Image (cartoon, rainbow, N blue to C red):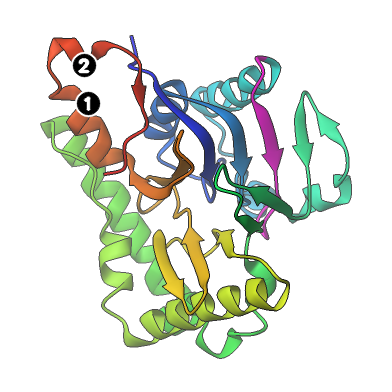
Amino acid sequence: MHQTHHCRTLFISDTHLGTADCQAELLLEFLQSTSCETLYLVGDIIDLWQLKSAIYWPRIMNDIVCELVSKANSGTQVIYIPGNHDELLRDFVGTDFNGIQIKLEDTHLTLKGERLLVLHGDALDDTVRTYRWTEALGSNLYDVALAISRTYNRICKRLGYNYWSFAAYIKYKFKNAVIFIDKFEAAAAHLAHRRGYAGVICGHIHHPNNCQYDSVKYYNTGDWVEHCSALAEDLEGNLRVIDWLQMRQLTASDTPASQKPQRLRAA
């Protein structure tokens, strides 16, 4: 039985369901282990780009979709903000799919009264196109890095070792990729400031972060390909990026007394 972690709001993005790189087992475990009042799906949840070229949809991905629908039907407000890999869903903005609301972007009001702009982030690509990290790193090299990660983690799983992303490791070794991330974050913060928000929440670049740009707070949910991360607003209104790989280890090592429902803790 999963230990349930409670929070006010959860934000996840870039799960890339429909690809072999999606860490589906860890994602399903995370969803089954958490409860919240509002769940934001901040884009690239289903990788329709990949599904156009090859169908990859094991049963566990159905289980993930069913879990999301179950949350929506059990009282959780679920808001889906499509990204570039699931941009076809933008044609359905304003509709409701089995209790899941589809929006182009949204305004989230924290318990502390902060207005945060929530969007996927691909709209910022034009602003930082010169440093688009997949181009800087080389899309072919990134694909190789993902393939190495898949092979490495298949072996690790058999040997009982934890997940580790070679793709994330190699990405941060490239100067242009780091420059792109910095410019993307600054552009997102500038957009939020210009529109009168206290902060911005996005995904898209597969780089979880929580930082400050002048008076604007910047949050990135990360992804479920390289990092297995999410953003959580706790019951006091504080927002933190969580690392599920670290958090599940802490949960597994808890004493029996801690098996009671817990507030979501940031790792």
Give the CA separation, mark 1 to mark 2.
Answer: 8 Å
Work out whether residue 21 can be spotted.
no
Three-letter residue code for mark 2: Ser
x and y, in percent, of residue 170 in the image: 27, 70
Above or below, 248 against 266 in this view is: above
The amino acid pointed to by label 1 is: Thr
> For residue 188, which quarter of the picture?
bottom right
Is the residue marked by circle 2 packed among few (<14), some (14-19), or many (20+) residues within 10 Å?
Answer: few
Residue at screen point 18% across, 32% down: 250
Sequence-first tag of 1 and 2: 1
Disc 2 target residue: 258
Q: Nearer the viewer, residue 47 or 79?
A: 79
Query: Residue 115 appears at what percent x and percent y?
Result: 65, 56
Compared with 136, 168 (above or below) is: above
Is 90 situated left or right of 185 in this image? right
Q: How many marks?
A: 2
| Start-end of magenta stretch | 74-86
Indicate whether residue 69 is drawn in magenta.
no
Percent of width and height locating residue 221: 48, 53
Is 81 included in the stretch rendered in magenta? yes
Crowdedness of circle 1 by 10 Å Cα count: few (<14), some, many (20+)?
some
Residue plotted at (61% across, 50% down): 113
- Residue at disc 1, secondary structure: helix
Q: Is residue 115 left or right of residue 10?
A: right
Q: Nearer the viewer, residue 73 or 130?
A: 73
